[in-house]
Image: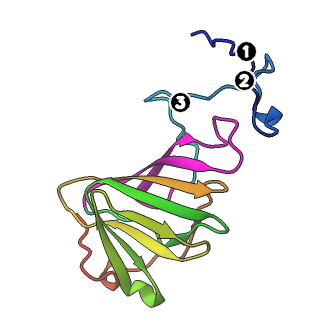
């Protein structure tokens, strides 16, 4: 791979912290199959990062794929100070929140969700046959604080495989 020199191209703003050993600032590519699994997990909710402090120079963003096997869910958790955005690629998910996790939103392909900082929630795959796969981005990093486990019967409509 070569990086062409672009005469007259100037960097907009300070970004020396992202420079490689040669002093140049270039995009960082994470190839499929080389994502990082060095991230906090939450029960049967598996997170894999494509962009994070674990394997890129990123310092203020975590971007990855989250998946739940059929009939599985996360532990109750929150993301500390982090703002979280999610996009459902495939499947039927439900996010439980509120007192005793009695409120929820269902999500399917193409739906977006924002989870505010410090908000306890549970992410569940409502299908017992298909994976739930979504993209998640979080700032500043993938903060996951697992909370006390709850019984499945508290989560209306959830069935474990």
Asked whether, in this view, residue 119 is left or right of residue 111, the answer is right
Residue 157: assigned label: none
* Label 2: element kind: loop
Asked whether, in this view, residue 93 is left or right of residue 34, the answer is left
Q: Quadrant of the C terminus?
A: bottom left
**Circles 2 and 1 in contact, beta carbons < 8 Å:** yes
Residue 90 shows in this picture: yes
Q: Is residue 58 magenta?
A: yes
Image quadrant where residue 145 sits: bottom right
Mark in front: 3 vs 2 = 2
Alpha carbon distance from label 2 to label 1: 6 Å
At which x and y percent is residue 77? 53, 70
Q: Which residues are magenta?
A: 41-70
* Label 3: element kind: loop
Alpha carbon distance from label 3 to label 2: 25 Å
- Mark 3 or mark 2: whose residue is earlier in sequence: 2
**Circles 1 and 3 in contact, beta carbons < 8 Å:** no
Residue 9: assigned label: 2
Instruction: Give the residue number, with chain letter if any, for mark 1.
Output: 7
Q: Residue drawn at (48%, 27%), measured in percent from left and top? A: 31
At which x and y percent is residue 124? 34, 67
Instruction: Give the residue number, with chain letter if any, for mark 3.
Output: 30
């Amino acid at each position: 791979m070569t990086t062409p020199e672009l005469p007259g191209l100037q960097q907009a703003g300070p970004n020396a912290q992202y420079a490689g050993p040669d002093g140049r600032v270039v995009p960082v590519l994470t190839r499929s199959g080389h994502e990082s699994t060095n991230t906090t997990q939450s029960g049967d909710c598996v997170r894999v990062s494509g962009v994070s402090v674990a394997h890129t120079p990123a310092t203020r963003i975590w971007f990855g794929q989250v998946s739940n096997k059929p009939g599985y869910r996360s532990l109750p958790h929150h993301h500390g100070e982090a703002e979280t955005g999610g996009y459902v690629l495939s499947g039927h998910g439900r996010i439980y929140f509120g007192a005793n996790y009695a409120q929820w939103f269902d999500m399917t392909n193409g739906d977006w969700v924002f989870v505010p900082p410090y908000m306890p929630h549970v992410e569940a795959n409502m299908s017992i046959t298909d994976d739930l796969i979504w993209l998640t981005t979080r700032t500043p990093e993938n903060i996951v604080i697992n909370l006390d486990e709850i019984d499945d019967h508290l989560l209306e409509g959830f069935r474990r495989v």
